[in-house]
Amino acid sequence: MILSDHEIRLAIENGELLIDPLPQRPQYSSSALDLFLGEPFQVWDTEGIDRITDMGLSNNLDPSKLVHFQALSSQYLIPAPTDAEGCFVLQPWGFVLGVTREQVGLPRESRIAARVEGRSTLARIGLMVHVTAPTIHVGWSGKIALEMLNIGPWPLTLRPNELPICQLIFERVGESAPNGPASQFQGQVSPGGS
């Protein structure tokens, strides 16, 4: 069952959902909660990846062999260039990793899971905010990673703390989840998973 705005508020008040900073009234819609864009931004170091090829090694990545994302991200994810206000300009067909401003906690005993979804206004200008990873499991705690892709015609200024970037849809899980999320990203504060 998807939680309504009233049920989301009650779950936060009762400690079944942990959202920091606490959401303000405009962040609620009838069945979702908007989250803001946070910082930092990270991009893949394409020059570093190209240097591997220049040394005669393959830069082909086989995702079936990728056991620990942090090993890859610590080597090839770099801070994205931002302006004096901390904004990142995402060019058409550009890709950047980011996080939500809000830290989200879904205590296991609450039996609440969530899905992160894009916002329709942003989708209509070509901004995808999560490529294929919408599920936030029962027991999760951390900032939500955003895989942002601009498929629109304009460069887009991504402004932390001012742009409502995504929405969370909360659902009650039918029975108690005995295990926490099997995620190497538990507790993350950066898009690289650390």
Image: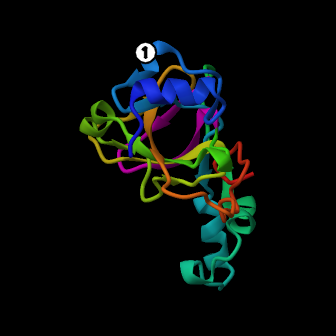
Q: How is the image coloured?
A: rainbow
Task: Please name the residue shown 69% across and 59% down the image.
Answer: 180
Q: Is residue 110 visible?
A: yes
What span is in magenta? 86-104
How far from the left and from the top, in percent, is residue 42? Answer: 62, 46
* Residue 66 lies in the magenta-colored region: no
Amino acid on which the number 1 mark rests in the picture: Pro
Vertical side of 170 occupied by 160: above or below: above
Vertical side of 39 occupied by 92: above or below: below
Extreme residue toward the top, this view = 25
Q: Quadrant of residue 70?
A: bottom right
Question: In terms of depth relative to the viewer, which is nearer, 16 or 141?
Answer: 16
Q: Is residue 158 visible?
A: no
Vertical side of 137 occupied by 90: above or below: above
Q: Quadrant of residue 98?
A: top right
How far from the left and from the top, in percent, is residue 4? Answer: 39, 31
How far from the left and from the top, in percent, is residue 171? Answer: 45, 46
Question: In terms of depth relative to the viewer, which is nearer, 172 or 159?
Answer: 172
Q: What residue is shown with label 1?
A: 26
How far from the left and from the top, in percent, is residue 152? Answer: 28, 42
Vertical side of 126 occupied by 139: above or below: below
Question: In terms of depth relative to the viewer, which is nearer, 30 or 100?
Answer: 30
Task: Please name the residue shown 35% across and 44% down the image.
Answer: 92
Predominant SS of the magenta segment: strand
